[in-house]
Amino acid sequence: MGATIIVLLLIALIPASIASKKGKSFGLWYVYGVCLWIVALIHSLVLPDESQNQNNNSANNSYKPYEPITKTESVINTVNKVKCTSVDINAKVRVQAWDIEKNSEENIYLKLNVLNTTSDVITALSIIAKGFDSFNNPVLINNKENFSVLVQDLRLLPNKYQEIPNKISLPDSNIRKIELYIQQICYEDGKIESLPEPCYIQTCQQKMDIEYIPYAQKINKQAKYYMIDQSNYWQCICGEVNTGKVCFNCKTSKEEAKRFSKDNAQFTLNQMLRQEEEEKKLFEKRQEEQRIQREKNEKQEQVKKKKNGVIAIIAVVVIICTACLLKVYQYNHTIKKIETSMDNEQWDNALKLMGESSKFKKLYNKYGEQLSSNVGYYDKAFGDQDFKTVYSEDDLYYYNTNISRNGLAYKIYETEEDYLGTVKTLCAIDENDRSHDIYTHYEHAYDTYDNDVEYIMWTNDWIIIQDYEDFFALKCDKSGNVSEVDLSDNLSDFYDKLYIKMADGNIVVADAEYLDEIDYDTNLMYFNTKKGSFTETSYERLEDKYDVEESWEDCILYKKYVD
């Protein structure tokens, strides 16, 4: 049994190892293999290789397929009523749009949308303005065309379009249009800067032809105009006017924007088309390489599966052969031990070895007749004996006893306990005269009935005794360790039972007086000497194990009826 468990624990490593190489948990598959080895082995062989699939997936993800460019339009959110068509390229704050509002009291207000082109926060603006009516006639303020406007308590962030939250009151209700010039700005740190005279340029750009827009938007998603490059400024493909190297609005560099000027757009388009074609070819090449690699991997996996299958089959054959050889070895080893015991006339030990072997029937056919005659002789010789009683510890020695089996002699050691009565101790004494107490019986002084410990039978190191209404199976090893099984717990009626010692040394207790009375309706109990268990059994089980249907006499060693 122990060897079989060891073999099972070893062969469970095979499906666990195969599954582990395919990306599965080694521990879980090892437990699976221990519980259902042959199922786990087949399952592991047909299991897909997840680690290979993960490698293939990672390879596929490294290539991005060609995606056609789609046209998108940027949206400029503004609160403008009038968008300025000219830009002061010298201004640190650009007026992008203005709006003139009039309230119910006929008061005129100005609202501005500006862009801070500096790298600092601005908190105040000093503006020079000129107003016009609806017919573009100047509106004079104190007989002057220009008037000053001061806007304070601001927080204009760098490089950001913002609507000034303050409504600027205009000095004349006839003003409907306005020209603005920011002459001074105040920064958050208190620094004041005066600005040069304005230099206005028109912001009108030619819209880009539709065939260029999708490709220009690969550079800048807001692209919709041809880039304009002048000596003192340039206009980006998003429409913003710039004087630096990078666009304020979309952060596109001047050099990138130049690729879609009116003169360069066609060249840039042809260049990008060639690049797309090259990328497409490269993508198709990689796809083909992946396909070839997948086919190669699949072939390798098939070869690997076949190889694993062959290895598994070889392993199974080796394991089966090993198990068979192990069983043969165990069988031959048992034979050797039985024959050694028989040569030394240790018949009880030889019977025990035969009874505990998985090849009992085969061994019984070979040695049963010789063992049965010799063991049966001792069983009958001691069957009607009583335990010898001694009254001194000096008499507890191996020899001069009524009952001795397999290196142990059994005696009753009786002592007086004053007025309480008598203590009778069943002792097992080995050949070195070492005594071991295995059962104690108390006989009270006022007991009027005969209450002795009686011997029933001995088998495979177990001695069966009766103590009035109780029946026990006791076993003492060479070290003095005692095992006890209370047979009374499993017997509804302790008397009128036939105790039968079978050919393997196990005991059958039958609710009958004679062997020929035992049939399928008889209540039967079975004492397994190897396990030390006393359980119910059936006639069918006995018939299967001992062939009792043919003859009870041929498969028993000894019987005793207890009435």
Image (tube, rainbow, N blue to C red):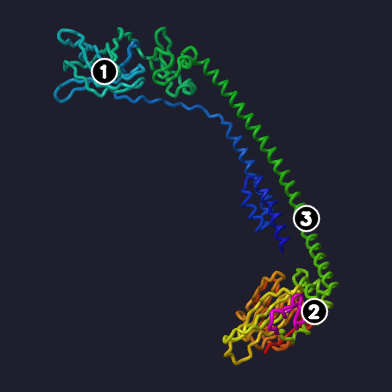
Residue 142 image-quadrant placement: top left
Secondary structure at badge 1 equals strand
Secondary structure at badge 3 equals helix
Crowd class of label 2 (few under 14; some 14 to 19; many from 20; radius 10 Å)? many
Crowd class of label 3 (few under 14; some 14 to 19; many from 20; radius 10 Å)? few
Exactly how many numbered labels are in the figure?
3
Q: Earlier in the sequence, mark 1 or mark 2?
A: 1
Q: In front here: 462 or 163?
A: 462
Vertical relation: 374 (above or below) 296: below
Residue 5: percent from the left, percent from the top? 70, 60
Q: Earlier in the sequence, mark 3 or mark 1?
A: 1
Name which residue type carries label 1: Ala
Mark number displayed over residue 317: 3
Quadrant of the image for the N terminus? Answer: bottom right
Name which residue type carries label 2: Val
Tags 2 and 3 in contact by the CB under 8 Å rule?
A: no
How far apart are the alpha carbons under marks 3 and 1?
94 Å
Observer-side mark, 1 or 2, equals 2
Which residue is labeled 1 in the image? Answer: 124
Q: Is residue 222 on the magenta stretch?
A: no
Crowd class of label 1 (few under 14; some 14 to 19; many from 20; radius 10 Å)? many
Can residue 455 be seen at all in this image of the molecule? Answer: no
Mark number displayed over residue 260: none
Can residue 410 be seen at all in this image of the molecule? Answer: yes
Residue 61: percent from the left, percent from the top? 58, 34
Horizontal side of residue 541 vs 232, given as left or right: right
Which residue is labeled 2 in the image? Answer: 375
Q: Which residues are magenta?
A: 389-409
Name which residue type carries label 3: Val
Residue 555: percent from the left, percent from the top? 78, 80
Horizontal side of residue 334 vs 243, given as left or right: right
